[in-house]
Image (spheres, rainbow, N blue to C red):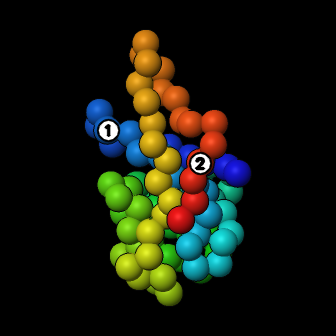
Amino acid sequence: MRIFAVRRGDAVRAYVNRCPHRGTPLDWVADQLLDEAGRDLVCATHGARFRVEDGVCIAGPCVGDQLVPVPLELREGALYAPAEIEEI
């Protein structure tokens, strides 16, 4: 399972790279997940838009659904994700 992380200022959010609508990866080109303005995450399959801050879909066929968040832990200056990710 692939995950991705997005940084906004000092905050970093990580999500499973899978759209809740179709189950396809969000990136349209490897590691390209944000809209042109760099504001929202966008699904390459059908253009659904997700807020970076909480992964909630704000436009498209899955409005109200959300990306699966991945908890991150900061240790000695590095971010770590769990070895196992629980899916919802």
Q: Position of residue 21 (x, y in %)?
A: 58, 79
Residue 11 has which mark?
1
Q: Position of residue 70 (x, y in %)?
A: 49, 47
Side of 86 relative to 29 (left or right): left
Residue 3 has which mark?
none
Residue found farthest to the top: 76
Question: Looking at the image, is mark 1 or mark 2 earlier in the sequence?
Answer: 1
Q: Residue at x 59, y 48 (%)?
A: 85
Q: Position of residue 67 (x, y in %)?
A: 49, 64
Residue found farthest to the bottom: 61
Name the residue type under label 2.
Ile
Residue 19: name its quadrant.
Answer: bottom right
Q: Residue at x 33, y 42 (%)?
A: 8
Name the residue type under label 1.
Ala
Q: Is residue 59 above or below residue 4?
A: below
Q: Is residue 86 above or below residue 72?
A: below
Q: Is residue 23 above or below residue 62?
A: above
* Mark-to-mark CA distance, 1 and 2: 20 Å
Q: Residues within 10 Å of mark 1 (few under 14, many from 20)?
A: few
Front one among 28 and 73: 73
Q: Residue at x 56, y 73 (%)?
A: 20
Q: Is residue 39 visible?
A: no
Q: Residues within 10 Å of mark 2 (few under 14, many from 20)?
A: some
Q: Secondary structure under badge 2?
A: loop
Residue pointed to by mark 2: 85
Q: Position of residue 29 (x, y in %)?
A: 68, 56
